Image (cartoon, helix red, strand yellow):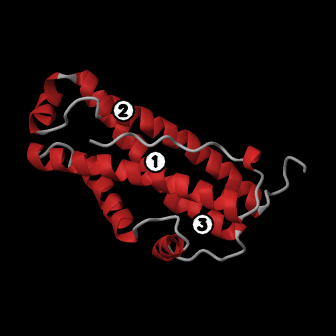
Amino acid sequence: MSVNSPLLPIERFLQTLRLVFREGNHLLYSYGRLYSQPVDVVWVQGLDVNPELAERLEAFISRFGRMQDTIADKLLPRWLLALAERPGSQIETLNRAERLGVVNNVENWLEARKLHNRLVHEYMEDAEAFAEDLVLAREYSIMLLDTFNRLHNFVAKRMEIEEATLPGLIALPEQD
């Protein structure tokens, strides 16, 4: 294949799957650093005097949003194209992924999108609400990582793609 020739849908999908694997591992790292201690109202209130924690939080929020965007905007549509299906709107794509067992719950995905916007745009205006949103972000991070693993398993079992060409699974964090 020459440098200028377009990628086949399956190649483009696999390329994006590898990208999301890397994003997932980066999110997992930030998740571990952020949630290695209790994240509550007192923790949020201390962000003003602890720039290291604020930096961890920023990295986590950025990686949470990036992985969410890449999965919903690129990976799932490219997966459907690799299946010879035509992706529709984002909600249609998410609904199709839910029917195929890759997305566990579309409503949670939509809520995670709203949550990301709150984390970015309503950053620490209300310490209690922000702390509650960070608890939700913890749960939704696991949802994102699990979605990657579900898609990986779908591809390995149902698309007859050589397992050696796939990235690994992402180890989900233990939940309290």
Q: CA distance from mark 1 to mark 2?
A: 17 Å
Which labelled disc corresponds to residue 66?
A: 1
- What percent of the width, then of the height, locates residue 67? 47, 49
Q: Earlier in the sequence, mark 1 or mark 2?
A: 2
Which labelled disc corresponds to residue 38?
A: none
- What percent of the width, then of the height, locates residue 43? 14, 32
Which quarter of the rendered picture does the C terminus lie within?
top left
Tell me the SS state at disc 3.
helix
- What residue appears at the point 32 percent right and 36 percent down from the top-left corner? 58
Of 8 and 120, nearer the camera is 8
- What residue appears at the point 36 percent right and 40 percent down from the top-left corner? 174
Q: Which residue is mark 3?
A: 77
Q: Is residue 55 above or below residue 106?
A: above
Q: CA distance from mark 2 to mark 3?
A: 29 Å
- What residue appears at the point 44 percent right and 39 percent down from the top-left corner? 27
Which labelled disc corresponds to residue 32?
A: 2
Type of the residue with mark 2:
Gly
Q: Quadrant of residue 82?
A: bottom right
Q: Earlier in the sequence, mark 2 or mark 3?
A: 2
- What residue appears at the point 45 percent right and 74 percent down from the top-left corner? 91
**Disc 2: CA contacts within 10 A as few (<14), some (14-19) or many (>=20):** few
Q: Are marks 2 and 3 in contact (CB under 8 Å)?
A: no
Q: Earlier in the sequence, mark 3 or mark 1?
A: 1
In the picture, measured across the screen, residue 27 lies left or right of residue 150, that is left
